[in-house]
Image (spheres, rainbow, N blue to C red):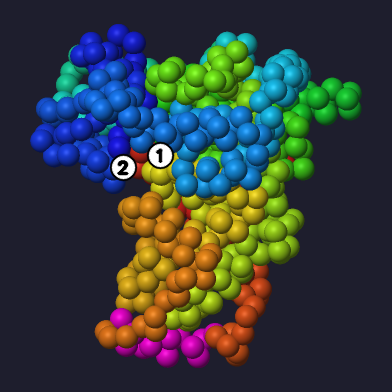
């Protein structure tokens, strides 16, 4: 089912009487019964209007049927409530593995992530202590890394990025773009795309105003002169200017721009003055300045990433982006050995989504446990921080490059995945090996984000119910990854390198329940692939035969992928697939590369 999770006050939905918890029933007369249907809803909302949507009011759904007997939903909630009161952790885990009702999920995740104990009587003391500790962290760390007093150097999410903000006429309007760079503290050019409407006299949109504010530094006449001289006037819509400050610092040749002022010379003189000023600073002041610049760069990197997190969900608006940035920055300050690595934002996002969405109906939670006295809604930021820290404690090794070759690192996890695939589906395993498809080509993102990038957010939340319920979380994760590969076995066996890579890096929309059922069968030893036959088997055999000669001797009959994985790790870190140091935005605010940028600030 598809429920309304948030309604903006004063918005169009609110004016029609929609409320949180209302259920979407029909889209232009077509029933909407699953999140697979919901994907189609999103696509059609972007492409055509008007649409007729029919909702069922949450208040119209009785908790008891007409015969007076308890409904299935009330019986389910009763079981989850009784499990909480029982203080039995095994019972709580067993229930959670099959999926947690939305009204109980925030509490159950806090327990499963070892933030709260199974004993309700201990919650109040634990919550008070941890929330006070988080307030201490905020006061200690959040004053660091601020580039300016008013925060103007940090861009806000560009308006119009969410599908709900798109007006029909704006969605199809042709615009011209001009890229205007501004030097950052990392001496790298920062581009902000400024849209200019074709119609003369049109007022700039919110996105344009934001982009202009990002590109124009305060009180910097040198930069203003550089931009004016390089852009060459308002008619030059296609100009892209390289950052002259970077060229000055690196000594690279630079073609001086024409204009009244020599912009390149201004930047060069400015950089030289800055070097001279730093040379005169006492050592402790220089260290403090360098630390400040590192903190600024870190916060800016985190801010860019959280803005790209689920841009299609209204839940992740600016205010919650700020919450995510605070959590990730404080985590980085407390963990200097790893700091922040791109992809952590994708791990935090589902926790934020669950904790920041209170139950639609108060009565839907519990009548025996007074959840209101624990102030879960008002303090969801602190609770999300500690749950994220506990989850990262389990995942820490996969984010540390120094641990890559260890069994707990990303290469070790990839080898375990391929070993499991070899046992379950030897034909697909042999085919991928013959094509030299290392697990890091696709499993790097699967594992580091716990599949949150491969699934719709509601599907991710449901998968994590099962993931968190098992103490061996990575065992469940790797089995789920194996299930996903086997569900695409026909296409993989018939495909060449490009087809297989495309399938695994951009996993096709798949019903989550089919993945969970296959994973359960694999773990129970009840499913194993039948030997391939027919055209796909012939195609796979042809690929294996043609590629086998190129492989190291004995690899197809061996069990180790260490050599290939080692080379792959070096390959990825050089940025060939959009890795370290090359963040390129793709559609809907996502990076164009299918792999997460393992760019660590540790």
Asked whether 51 or 267 is in front, the reply is 51
Sequence-wise, which precedes: disc 1 or disc 2?
2
Tell me the residue that label 2 is attached to. 35
540 with respect to 460 (left or right): left
Mark 1–mark 2 distance (CA, rounded to whole Å): 8 Å
Q: Is residue 539 magenta?
A: yes
Secondary structure state at the residue bearing disc 1: helix
Instruction: Confirm whether residue 112 shows in the render.
Output: yes
Tell me the residue that label 1 is attached to. 458
Which residue is depicted at the point 18% across and 18% down? 200
Crowdedness of circle 1 by 10 Å Cα count: few (<14), some, many (20+)?
some
Which residue is depicted at the point 73% across and 63% down? 406
Residue 280: quarter of image: top right
Q: Do tag 1 and tag 2 residues touch (Cβ < 8 Å)?
A: yes
Above or below: residue 280 compared with residue 511 = above
Q: Position of residue 484 (x, y in %)?
A: 43, 61
Above or below: residue 414 compared with residue 7 = below
85 with respect to 463 (left or right): right
Tell me which segment is drawn in magenta: 536-551
């Amino acid at each position: 089912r598809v429920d309304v999770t948030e309604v903006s006050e004063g918005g169009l939905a609110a004016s029609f009487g929609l409320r949180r918890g209302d259920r979407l029933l029909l889209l232009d007369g077509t029933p909407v019964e699953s999140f697979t249907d919901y994907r189609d809803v999103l696509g059609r909302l972007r492409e055509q209007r008007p649409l007729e949507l029919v909702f069922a009011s949450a208040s119209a759904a009785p908790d008891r049927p007409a015969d007076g007997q308890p409904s299935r939903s009330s019986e389910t909630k009763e079981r989850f409530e009784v499990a909480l009161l029982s203080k039995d952790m095994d019972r709580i885990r067993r229930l959670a593995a099959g999926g947690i009702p939305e009204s109980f999920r925030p509490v159950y995740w806090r327990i499963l992530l070892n933030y709260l104990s199974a004993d309700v009587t201990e919650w109040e003391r634990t919550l008070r202590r941890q929330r006070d500790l988080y307030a201490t962290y905020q006061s200690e760390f959040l004053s660091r890394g601020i580039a300016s007093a008013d925060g103007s150097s940090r861009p806000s999410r560009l308006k119009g990025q969410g599908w709900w903000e798109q007006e029909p006429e704006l969605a199809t309007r042709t615009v011209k773009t001009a890229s205007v760079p501004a030097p950052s503290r990392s001496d790298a050019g920062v581009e902000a795309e400024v849209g200019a409407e074709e119609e003369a006299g049109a007022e700039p949109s919110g996105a344009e105003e934001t982009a202009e504010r990002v590109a124009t530094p305060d009180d910097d006449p040198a930069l203003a002169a550089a931009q004016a001289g390089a852009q060459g006037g308002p008619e030059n819509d296609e100009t892209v200017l390289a950052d002259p400050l970077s060229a000055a610092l690196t000594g690279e040749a630079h073609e001086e721009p024409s204009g009244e002022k020599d912009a390149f010379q201004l930047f060069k003189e400015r950089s030289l003055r800055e070097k001279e000023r730093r040379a005169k600073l006492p050592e402790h002041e220089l260290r403090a300045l360098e630390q400040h610049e590192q903190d600024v760069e870190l916060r800016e990197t985190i801010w860019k990433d959280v803005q790209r997190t689920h841009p299609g969900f209204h839940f992740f608006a600016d205010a919650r982006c700020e919450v995510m940035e605070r959590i990730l920055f404080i985590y980085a300050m407390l963990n200097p050995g790893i700091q922040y690595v791109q992809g952590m934002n994708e791990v935090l996002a589902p926790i934020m989504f669950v904790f920041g969405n209170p139950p639609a109906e108060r009565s839907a939670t519990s009548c025996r446990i007074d959840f209101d006295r624990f102030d879960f809604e008002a303090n969801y930021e602190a609770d999300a921080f500690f749950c994220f820290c506990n989850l990262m404690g389990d995942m820490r090794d996969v984010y540390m490059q120094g641990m890559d070759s260890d069994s707990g690192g990303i290469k070790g996890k990839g080898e375990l995945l391929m070993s499991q695939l070899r046992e379950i589906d030897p034909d697909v395993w042999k085919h991928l090996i013959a094509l030299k498809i290392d697990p890091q080509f696709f499993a790097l993102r699967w594992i580091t984000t716990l599949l949150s990038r491969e699934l719709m957010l509601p599907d991710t939340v449901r998968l994590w119910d099962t993931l968190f319920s098992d103490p061996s979380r990575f065992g469940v994760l790797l089995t789920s990854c194996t299930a996903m590969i086997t569900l695409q076995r026909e296409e993989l066996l018939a495909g060449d390198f490009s087809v297989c890579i495309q399938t695994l890096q951009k996993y096709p929309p798949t019903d989550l329940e089919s993945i969970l059922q296959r994973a359960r069968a694999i773990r129970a030893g009840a499913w194993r692939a039948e030997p391939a036959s027919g055209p796909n088997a012939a195609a796979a055999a042809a690929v294996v035969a043609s590629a086998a000669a190129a492989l190291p001797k004995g690899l197809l009959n061996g069990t180790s992928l260490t050599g290939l994985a080692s080379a792959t790790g070096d390959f990825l870190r050089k940025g060939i697939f959009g890795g370290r140091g090359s963040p390129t935005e793709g559609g809907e605010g996502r990076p164009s590369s299918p792999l997460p940028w393992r760019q660590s600030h540790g």
